[in-house]
Image: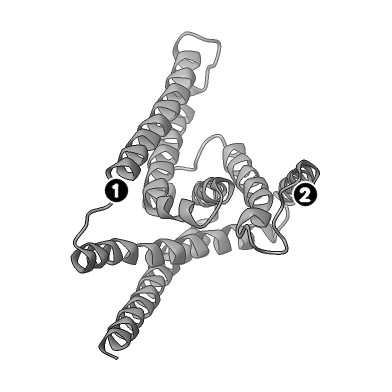
Amino acid sequence: MMVVSWILDYFPPWLAIVLVTTGSVLITWGLPFVDPKSDFAVEAPKGVFGTLILGIGTGFTIWGARKTASFDTVVVGIILLGSFMQGAVAVNFYRKVYDFVSNGSPPSSGGFRRKIIAHLLMLFLLLIALWTIIYFIIWGNLDLGIQDTVRLYWTIATVIISVLGLSTRFWFMQRGFPPQIMFGGIFLITGAEIFNLQFEVELTTFVLSHIVYTLGFWIAAFLFVSSVRNSNRTHRR
């Protein structure tokens, strides 16, 4: 996706800011809910409202900083962090295979069924949004011109593929994290990926993202192998 963005800028440019802002609000809102046993856990409605207000404040801060010179650095940081996380969660597939072989039992069919339903629902909502935009382009008064129309279709396709791909990779996080953080992270990374950067920055980020992805994968793989070895030693004793 990033290779094509070297030629075509994503359109409309404000969409990236909206996604980054929304992701920031959701992540900030969900942080107190990470560990229910923690002293920072929020249960009372007043606390929930307070964290929501804090999240909205974070969103306004991000929105206000969108035109500053340092915002590009923030976007690059989000992309690299997202690449590292995607590399790390890629090891989760091998972990599931190992657990299946060790325990001799497949994942619960109910959880798998819910996962499929959630993905189909997300795809349905994205397709509704896509066809709504197409409707306004063809039958509405939205006249963008050929170039902007192509850029719009390309942006929508990129967002759909990114959201679905990240949802599949990060779905396991719902067990330890609230949905606000999972979807917030998805919107945050997607928004950063469709942010229009300068060509030199795009190229550098493209190379660094692959390096960071590989680093995240091998760090997670090392931790996974170490945990398996420690578990085997404990069983032997």
For badge 1, the amino acid type reads: Ser
Who's the residue at 51% across and 52% down the image? 189
Name the residue that disc number 1 marks: 108
Indicate left or right for 225 with 132 as reference: left
For badge 2, the amino acid type reads: Leu
Who's the residue at 38% across and 79% down the image? 223
Question: Would you say the residues marked 2 and 1 are in contact, meaning their CB atoms lie under 8 Å apart?
Answer: no
Q: Quadrant of residue 35?
A: bottom right
Q: Residue furthest front?
A: 237
Who's the residue at 58% across and 37% down the image? 15
Q: CA distance from mark 2 to mark 1?
A: 37 Å
Badge 1 density bin: few <14, some 14–19, many ≥20, Cα 10 Å: few
Q: Position of residue 232 (x, y in %)?
A: 27, 83
Indicate left or right for 130 with 106 as reference: right
- Nearer to me, 82 or 219: 219
Q: Position of residue 5 (x, y in %)?
A: 43, 48
Who's the residue at 63% across and 42% down the image? 22
Q: Quadrant of residue 228?
A: bottom left
Q: Position of residue 157 (x, y in %)?
A: 39, 36
| Front of the two marks 2 and 1 | 1
* Above/below status of 83 relative to 122: below
Name the residue that disc number 2 marks: 54
